[in-house]
Image (cartoon, rainbow, N blue to C red):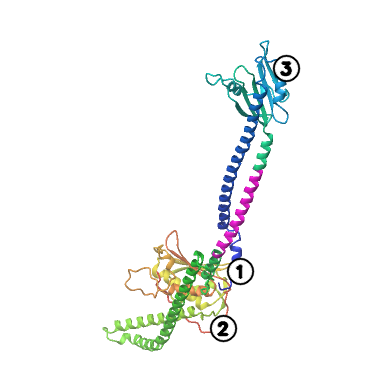
Amino acid sequence: MTSGPGGGRWGSRFPRWTSLRLRLVAVFAAVALTAAVSVSGIAYWLNRDAVLTRAQNSALNDFRDSLQRNAALLPVAPTCQSLQTAAGRIGGPDTYQVVLISTGPDGQECAAPSNRDVFTLDDVPATLQKAVNTVHGNDRKYHLHWERISLQSRPYLVAGARINGDGPTGYMLKSLDAERKDLNSLAWSLGISTLLALIGAALLAQAAGAAVLRPVRRLGEAAQRLGEGHLDTRLKVSGTDELAEMSRTFNNAAEALENRVEELSAREAASRRFVADMSHELRTPLTAITAVSDVLEDEAEALDPMIAPAVRLVVSETRRLNELVETLMEVTRFDAGTAKLRVDEVDVGEQVMACMDARAWLDSVELDAPRGVLATLDPRRLDVIMANLIGNALKHGGSPVRVTVRGDGEGDGDIEVAVTDHGPGIPEDVLPHVFDRFYKADASRARSEGSGLGLSIALENAHIHGGGITAANDPSGGAVFTLRLPRHPREEEASDAVNGGSPDGLPGGTR
């Protein structure tokens, strides 16, 4: 892309972490987190089931075999001592603890634990005891039953079985603490893996975001520079993907826009040259026509009454045409940037009064202008502005027309001149166009006395001073045109350059 002013400011407007980049990272992270948590959860539950099942089956099978080897050899009514000895042979501190229950020779039930401090019959859930003592079928068979319980916040496997017939009942307690530690280690490992996957996804999103958003950022920079008027801005195209196609489309659009703007600029320059040349060419014959019309006007009283009205019409239209040519020449000066200021320190109130006096408006306009409001400006251009604003209010507004000058003596604030009429006001759809060239709001008039350039010329004269004019409607009725000028124009050239424009101010019929 071509370089130029303005590109260096882009970094502050487009920070590295844009909302799009954050959303991209968030999406990647969410997908990675969901996938990692799902996989880790499935892996954890599968491994947990496998570990617990393996430990459980091993303990249950060993308990069943040991119970059959030791308890099945006991007599039908073993003594508590023999029952205790069998329990010691079955259970052990390194495997599991057992409790054997049987009815002794004296008819009393005896419970013999392998370690009374670790496991007693009270630790066996009632539901498990009921299931163990339930007979299955007519052949009086008993099954091995088990449950997982928690004692003192530690996991255990408890199981029970009864020797078929009148044999003793045995219960086993197997600690699952080692398996829990293994599962906790597995959970930590899976958690760390999930975190690493999340970090990897964020880094991947960052890399992908940089690769995707860099061309988008360059496109934004190019669009901004194009909007600032750098029509030669182009993007470097590489690759064949969608982003490269977008860059090609931008380059084609920029090239078409540049060609179109050059074509329009050439047409505008040609139009301006034509208007300027036409105005200059018309001045010579108009000078002669004006001289003849002046002579005819002086002799109008001596002419035939049938010819006199035609003579007066020619004189009037000649003056109007002369004013129009002078206005067009003034417009070409503004367009070409050759209009200059011939400034002087003047009393604004006195200048406005002089403008009204020269056009015999003192009886038609109310003036509120304190003396001593001084400003450095071009008196002729101020006269042009006020002549257009006041003439426009008299022609298209309603009486009374009031001109108000506001300013603080010799202070540094702006000078403000408001021209208010009491007419119907300006239609809302017309307000944005009142200063447009050749714009006339009242299309019902077949022919307007104005050229449609008066307010445009007034605005240009305000701009060359560094000021402006606004148009609005007064809530109480009528239109208000407000002129604001700085006390010292931004461009002061105390030269004797000839200034264009009509000294009469050309009060134009813009409204």
> As displayed, is residue 118 above or below residue 510?
above
Using the rendered view, name the quadrant where residue 218 is placed.
bottom right
Residue for badge 2? 495
Comparing 252 with 331, the one in front is 252
Q: CA distance from mark 1 to mark 3?
A: 96 Å
Type of secondary structure dominating the magenta stretch: helix
Q: Earlier in the sequence, mark 1 or mark 3?
A: 1
Amino acid at pointer 2: Ser
Q: Nearer the viewer, mark 2 or mark 1?
A: 1
Magenta residue span: 187-215
Q: CA distance from mark 2 to mark 1?
A: 41 Å
Q: Residue furthest top?
A: 106
Q: Earlier in the sequence, mark 3 or mark 2?
A: 3
Comparing 46 with 326, the one in front is 46
> As displayed, is residue 142 above or below residue 316?
above
Comparing 125 with 307, the one in front is 125
* Picture quarter with the N terminus: bottom right
Q: Earlier in the sequence, mark 2 or mark 1?
A: 1
Residue for badge 3? 81
Which residue is at a point 63% across and 52% down the rendered structure image? 199
Where residue 310 sits: x, y (%)? 29, 83
Amino acid at pointer 1: Gly
Where residue 128 sits: x, y (%)? 60, 24
Q: How many marks?
A: 3
Q: Residues within 10 Å of mark 3 (few under 14, many from 20)?
A: few
